[in-house]
């Protein structure tokens, strides 16, 4: 077994404080601090130094984590090999809201049916929490949408692979002049009032940059982070908005979804994350097969 204190150190490095690392592990800060002090004493080196309210990893700690990362990945490969003949325990998938609605339940049900005796769980969570769930071992597979908060592709803690690009569609009121079209260039909406996500959110820059690429800056009339809120505003004539193809629209709303044409066709990347070395687990392979098939069947208007 790998020394669990290495995972604690990894989480302190990830979160920047002992308190946040302890919270993610459901430990008390004093327990984590005590364990890391013991690890430091066992190794005869200083691992953490105080820096205001956070801590700084010493060079020794960074060296230790570099080697621990290889150990974690090799352990995941071992678990994958062991799983070839035995499927028990808990398998957890997590992801952002749309994925949790339309992709993960389908995949979880398929894995449950394929591996008798396996307890399959689904967690809806924002990207930052999904990453933490992977690091703590509380999730095995995560579906995340590309944001600036995601770890870079070079982050050796994870195996991350592009799954699909989810196109963004224009949504207008059913009586809007554009509702008679089957496709619309984003430039045709230059004079519309827009419903956007919050400026600090992930989808505001996606819409803003797409509109600017089409030659205009959108007139931000309302702000809504939830797709249902934005669509409800459209249904009541407050403006137009963009929604991802994967998001479903209530049939009783008086709106029309229209595919975008031309050069400015925004999409949101959806990426699958596992811990490094875990990708070949039979459960993860099966889940990804189901997710990919489900996603392919959804992308029709």
Image (spheres, grey):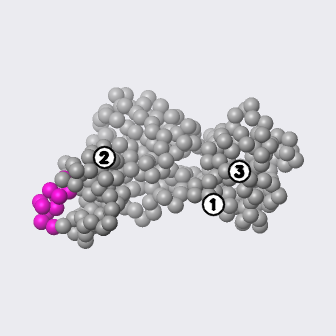
The residue pinned by badge 2 equals 25
Circles 1 and 2, Cβ within 8 Å, touching? The answer is no
Decide if residue 145 is in sight here. yes
Residue 54 is inside the magenta segment: no
Residue 155 image point, x, y percent: 40, 62
The residue pinned by badge 3 equals 222
- Give me the residue at 50% from left, 50% from top: 144
- Give me the residue at 22% from left, 69% from top: 60
Q: Of the residues under marks 1 and 2, which one precedes in the sequence?
A: 2
Residue 14 placement: quadrant: bottom left
Secondary structure under tag 2 reads helix
Image side of residue 239 versus residue 21, left or right? right
Residue 6 image point, x, y percent: 24, 56
The residue pinned by badge 1 equals 205
- Give me the residue at 30% from left, 64% from top: 55
Residue 294 placement: quadrant: top right
């Amino acid at each position: 077994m790998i020394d669990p204190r290495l995972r604690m150190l990894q989480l302190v490095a990830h979160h920047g404080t002992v308190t946040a690392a302890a919270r993610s592990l459901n430990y008390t800060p004093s327990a984590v601090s005590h364990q890391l002090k013991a690890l430091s004493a066992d190794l005869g080196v200083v691992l953490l130094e105080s820096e205001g309210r956070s801590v700084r990893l010493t060079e020794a700690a960074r060296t230790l984590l570099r080697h621990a990362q290889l150990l974690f990945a090799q352990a995941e490969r071992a678990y994958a090999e062991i799983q070839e003949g035995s499927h028990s325990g808990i398998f957890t998938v997590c992801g952002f809201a749309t994925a949790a609605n339309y992709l993960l339940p389908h995949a979880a049900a398929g894995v449950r049916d394929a591996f008798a005796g396996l307890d399959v769980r689904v967690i809806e969570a924002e990207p930052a929490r999904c990453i933490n769930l992977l690091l703590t071992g509380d999730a095995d597979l995560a579906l995340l949408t590309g944001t600036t908060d995601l770890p870079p592709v070079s982050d050796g803690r994870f195996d991350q692979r592009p799954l699909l690009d989810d196109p963004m569609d224009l949504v207008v009121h059913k009586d809007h002049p554009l509702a008679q079209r089957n496709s619309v260039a984003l430039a045709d909406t230059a004079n519309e009032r827009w419903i956007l996500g919050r400026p600090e959110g992930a989808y505001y820059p996606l819409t803003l940059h797409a509109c600017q690429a089409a030659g205009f800056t959108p007139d931000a009339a309302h702000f809504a982070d939830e797709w249902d809120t934005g669509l409800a505003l459209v249904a009541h004539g407050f403006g137009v908005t963009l929604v991802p193809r994967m998001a479903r629209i209530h049939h009783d709303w008086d709106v029309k979804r229209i595919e975008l044409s031309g050069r400015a066709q925004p999409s949101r990347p959806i990426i699958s994350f596992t811990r490094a070395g875990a990708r070949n687990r039979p459960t993860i392979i099966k889940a990804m097969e189901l997710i990919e098939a489900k996603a392919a069947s959804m992308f029709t208007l």
